[in-house]
Amino acid sequence: MKKRTMRLIAALASAAMVASSFGIGAFAAEGDGSTPRNETLYFAGQQWGTINDWNPMSANSNNAMGIQQKDSTRTLIYETLFMYNLLDNELYPLLGTEWAWDDEATMASMTVKLNPDAHWSDGTPLTAADVVATFDYNVKCNSAYGVEMTSFITSMEAVDDATVKINSVVGDDGVAVNPLMIKQMLQKMYIMQKAYLEKVEERAGSPEDMKLDKMDDLVASGPYMPYYDDDQKVVFIRDENYWGQAESMWGSLPVPKYIAHTIYEGNSNAQVAFEAGEVDVAQVFMTDIQKLWEEKELPITTYIDEEPYNLASTIPTCFFNVEVPGLDRVEVRKAIAMATDFEQIRSSAMSNQSPSFKDYPRSMMNPSDPEQALFDHDALKDLQWEGGDIEGAKALLDEAGIVDTDGDGIREVDGQNLHFKAECPSGWTDWNASLEIVAAAGKEIGIEIETYFPEASVYTDDYTTGNFEITMSSPTGASITNPFYRCKQFLYGPFADLEINYSGNYGHYRNAEADEILDKLATETDEAKLKEYYTRLNEIYLTDVPSFGLMYRPDMFYEVNETVWTNYPMKDDGSNIPPTDCTDGYGIAALYQLELVEG
Amino acid sequence: MKNTLRNIFHSPKFVIGFIIFFGLLAFTLIYPFFVAADPLDMVGQGNFFKPGTYVSVQDTVDAKYYTLNIQAKSSNLGDHIEEKDKQDMRDWLLNYGEVSQEELDAADDNALVVLWLEHYDEKAKQKGLLASKKKAYVRLNKEIVKLASDADLIIAVENEDGELEESKSVDSKQYVNTKDIANQRKLVLGTDNFGRDVLTELVQATKVSLKIGLIAGTVATLIGLMLGLLSGYIGGLFDNIIIFITNLFTVIPSFVLLILITYSVGQNARGVTLIAAVIGLTSWTWTCRSVRSQVISLRNRDHVNLSKLSGHSMIRIVLTDILPYVASYVVMAFILQISSGILAEAQLSMLGLGPSTTSTATLGQMMNWATMYSAHLNGSWWAYFPVVLVITLIAFSLNLMNTGLDQVFNPQLRD
C-alpha cells in the first residue's frame, strides 16, 4: 500500500515536471503552440520579450505585437474607430463608418457613426456605450492615454446604439483647442467592452488598479485573438466569427489563420531566420539589404526596389540641451550641425536606406509630398547647410569668438572647454553609428563630443528629465496630427515646463514667437495661412538650431520574404496600402490580399 | 646569460612565436611609412566596400586612351548572360510574353535576347509572379539592354547654356593604363561600416592592442611579482594579509571588476593607457600566488641562509638570491599576461567599453562595429576576419614563445 502511494506521488511529480517544462504561458494551447507553416504569417522585429499583459491601459505593457497605439495603431486584437493611412493621410472606416464635426467653425463636438455589424469576440454587439465606457475608464484609471485625452476631450456621450458624440475641450473663444488630437484619437483609442471593463474593475478593486490587470481573459473585437505565448514566441489565432467578414467591412476573413512572432535575441538572429524563410515580414534594420536579392538572390523585397528601399517617415534628431553652458550659444549648436557629415550618416550609418538631405533640404517636415508642400522652400534656402562643412563651422566659431585659448585643441566658452556627452541607447546600431559620426565632426572643429550608450531605460530617464547634454530622439512620424505635432515637439516652450517630459522639446528651448504660432496652428485650416506659419517656424528652427535632424528614416522597416506568402503591398501597385508591416493602421488591409506562393 | 639566450633561440617553438610576433610588430611600425592616411578617416560613403583598387572615374575619362585589339567581353551577348538568367528569360517569355514554346526551343542565345528585347515589358500583367521576382526581371532587363547596345559611349559636358556638348566618344576597344590615373586608392582590405580603410585601421589597432598588452602585462607582472616576493619571503602576518587580499581578488571574477571600473570612469577618461592599467590591476593575482609559493620553497635554501648569516639586507637577498630563480617563470607569466591583456581589451571593446571609437581604433572596437553592422551575415569577411586573425596570431605567437621558454627552463621538459 505504502509502496503504491509512493509510486503514485512519483508519477504525479514527474507529470507535473513534464507539464512545467512546456512553457506554460497565459494561453497554453495545444502543447507548444506550433502551427502549420502555410497558415501562419511569421513576423520579426516587433516583440523582443515575453509578453507581460494584454491590457491597453497598462502603464508597463511590453506587448508590442498585440498592443501598439501610435501614429498608425495596430488593430490585430483590439480595434480603433478608424484606421490611418500614411500614404494619403486619410482615415479609413473600421468600427466607425463616418465622422464629422457638428460645427466646422468651432469644432466643439464631433459625431461618429458606428458600424452596426460590429460585435465582440463573445458575440455581443459593439455599441456606442462601449466607446463611451472606454473613454470613461481610461480617464478614471489615469492611463497614460486617458490623461492625455482629457486635455482635448471633455466627455463622450452615446446618442443611440450606433452614434457617439465627442465633446471637445474649448478655449475662451468657444473653439476646440486641439481638434487634430481628437482626429488622432479616432485611430488611436482601442475600443474595449463595457461589460468586460466593469468586470475588471470589480476584480481589481479600484479603477487605479485596473492598470495592473493582466487581462488574460480579454474580450476584443479584432480579427485575431491570443492563442499561445511564452518566452520563445507569441501566436495569435484568427477569430472565425470576426465581425469584419461582413460586407460592410472587409467582406472576408484575413488570409493567414495564425500570426506568429518568434522572440529573437537580436537583429542578427532575426535576420538569419528571415533569410532562411522562417520569417515572412521583418521590421529589422539590415545592412546592405540589397545584397539579399542582388547577391544572395533570395525571394526578398522591400516596399521600394531602389534606394532608400523603405518609405521614410521620421527624422531621428539630435537635441541640444540649451540650458547647458556652451550649448546655450547658437553658434556652437550650429557649428556642430554644420560640421556633421550627413551623407556619411545616410550612406554608412543608415546603409543607404534613407533619402538624402540633398533631395529634401532640412526642415521639420517629412520627405513626403504633402508635408513638403506645406512650406516655402525658397524662403529657407539661405538658412540651409550642407553638412560636412568643417571650414564653415570653424569660421562660424572663430567669428563668434569661441576659440581655443589654452592650446589643448579644444575651444572654450567662458574659460570652459567645450565638452559634451551625446547619448542614445546601446544596441541601436544606426543611431550609435550616427552619433559617432557627429562626434568625429566635433573632433574636427575643436569641440569634444563623447558618445554615451546606456541601457534604453537610463536613456529614457535622462531625456525626459532634461538630464543630458546632447541626446537623440525620433519625433512622431507620419500621422494625422503632423507636421503640426512634430513642429511642436521641436519647438514648443511649455513642454519644457513639464517635470517629466515625454512630449517633446527635450532640450528646453524657448521662443515666444514659435509658441504663439504653434498655438494658432492648432486650429488653423486656411492653406495659405498654414504655409506662412510653417515657413516661419522652419525659419526659426534653422536659425536657432535647438536640434538638428540626422537623417530621414522609416518609422518601421518593411522587408518581406516571399517563400510562403506573396502579394504583399508594394509601392505603385495600385493598392494604396501603406508599408506598415501588414499590421498597423490601414496597412492591415494587406492581410486580406495575401496569397500562398504556388507549388 | 649568453648560454641561456642561445638555448632559447634553439627552441623551434620559441623561434616561430618570436618571428610571428616581431613580424606583426615590424609590420605595424613600417606600414605608416607607406600609407600616411588617418586610420579613422571615413573614405568610403557606404558600408563594407570590397577589397580592391579604386580609381577615379573622372580620371579614366580624361586619361590618355590606347586602342587595344582585344575583343571586349560583352561583345558576345550569349556568353555573358548566365544559364540561370537565360532560363528565367525563357520562363517569362513563355508565361507572360506571348511567345510559343516552339519559338523558344528554336532560339539560340542571341535570338533569345532579340526575343526578350522585343517582348519584355515590365508593366505587363504578371499574375502569380512574386514581387521579388518581378523586380529581379526589371534588373535583368536593364542589364540585357546595356549589354545589347553596341553604340559608342558618349561623354558630354554641359556648356554655358546648360546644353550637353559631346566632348568624346568611347568605343569598346579603348583602354587606359592604370599608371596614368592620378587618383587611385588601394583598399587592400576594403572598408568597414563607417567607410574607413580596414587595413590602415587594423595596423593602428594592432599597435594599440600591443601597447595595451604590454602595459597591462607589465603592471600585472610588477604587482604580482612584488607582492609575491615580499609575502613569500617575509611570511607571517604580512603574508597572511597579502594572501587574503590576493584571494579576495581571485574570487571576484576579474572581468566583472573590469567592466565595473571601465564603466564607472566614463568613456572620455577611457584612454588606451587607462584601459591597459585597469586590465593590469585586475589580473595580477595568479602571478602573485605562484611567485609566493616558489619563494617559500626557496627561502630556506642554503645559499639564502648563507646570505642571511652574512648580514645582507632583505632587499639584496630578494633581488640577488631569490629573484634569479623565479625570473624564468616571471618572464613566461609576463608573456601570458600580455596575451590575456590583449584579449581582455578585445572583450571590453566588444561590449562597447573600450576606448572611444573616434579617438582610436582597437581590435575589439573593429569587431564590435563589424558585428553591429552584421558583416558576418552579408559576406563582408574583410571587416572581421583579418581582425580575428591578428588577435589569434598575437595570442598564438605569445603562447608559442611561452611553451618554448618552458621547454628551455623546465628541467622536466628538457630533451
Image: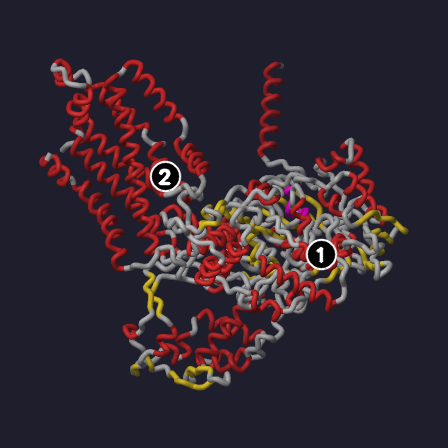
> Looking at this view, is A108 or A579 the one in front?
A108
Q: Which mark is residue A516?
A: 1
Task: Give the position of the N terminus of chain B as an image quadrant.
Answer: top left
Q: Which mark is residue B274?
A: 2
Q: Residue at x 17, y 31 (%)?
A: B409
Image position, residue A497 (x, y; %): 67, 45
Front label number (2 vs 1): 1
Say whether residue A74 is left or right of residue B358: right
Say whether residue B319 is left or right of residue B240: left
Q: Secondary structure at mark 2?
A: helix
Other-residue count near label 1 (Cα within 10 Å), few / some / many at <14 / 14–19 / ≥20: few
Do callouts 2 and 1 point to residues on the same chain? no
Image position, residue B125 (x, y; %): 62, 73
Say whether residue A299 is left or right of residue A102: left
Counting labels gives 2
**Range shown magenta:** A61-68
